Image: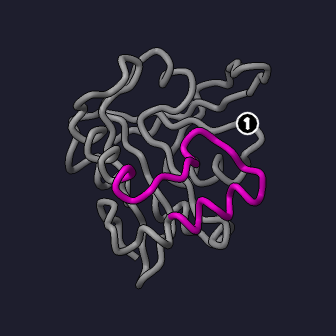
Amino acid sequence: MKLIYPDREYFCSYDAAIEKYLQKGITQYHLVRYDADTFFERVARYRTGKDLPSNRLPCTFLWLVEESEFIGEVSIRHGLNDALLRYGGHIGYWVRSTRWNSGVGTQMLAMALDYVRAHFDFERVLITCDDDNIGSARVIEKNGGILENKIENHFDDETVLTRRYWISL
């Protein structure tokens, strides 16, 4: 397995992973289907920070791939704003559903932390997850995450209890 910048070679596999999530009824903000050109233009904009909405920060996307298969995605925000301090943090990630509970998330986050150490000047990073996402909490804790607190976040008509972890680099 390797962590790479998004590559057209894996786009169909990436798109299929998103489709599986949507079929399972998982509809988080990052699970949007784009055509390849739109997707790669969006990735480039976020990486450079060019033409982003005022409430968004630059972000580097990385894909975990193995052979010809997309396994998961990591998003590394280049800083924090008030919203990311509450929900999202510096690093977000997701693993294709067929690879859940296989240790891939733990390995992918470890690789992402190595990337952050090499490319950013952060002393520590914030990573959040929903309180009921025990798998994600374990991934973060296995990578040295220290729970700072749990806070309520409000999205539309939904209240989500969020775990906030810090990992020292």
> Where the C terminus falls, by quadrant?
top left
Identify which amino acid the numbered label 1 is placed on: Asp
Residue 55 point in image, percent of width and height: 41, 19
Question: Where residue 35 sits: x, y (%)?
Answer: 44, 56
Closer to the camera in the image, 136 or 56: 56
Q: Is residue 42 above or below residue 151?
A: below
Question: In front: 125, or 60?
Answer: 60
Magenta includes 45? no
Q: Residue at x 69, y 22 (%)?
A: 155
Residue tagged 1: 131
Q: In which quarter of the image is residue 110?
A: bottom left
| Image quadrant occupied by the N terminus | bottom left
Image spot of residue 164 (x, y percent): 58, 30
Is residue 31 a member of the stretch shown in magenta? Answer: yes
Number of labels in the image equals: 1
Would residue 85 be found to the left or right of residue 149 on screen? Answer: left
Q: In this view, does 28 lie above or below 87?
A: below
Q: Which residue range is magenta in the image?
A: 15-39
- The residue sitting at 37% across, 43% down in the picture is 76
Q: Residue at x 49, y 65 (%)?
A: 14
In the image, residue 73 sits, relative to residue 82, either above or below, namely below
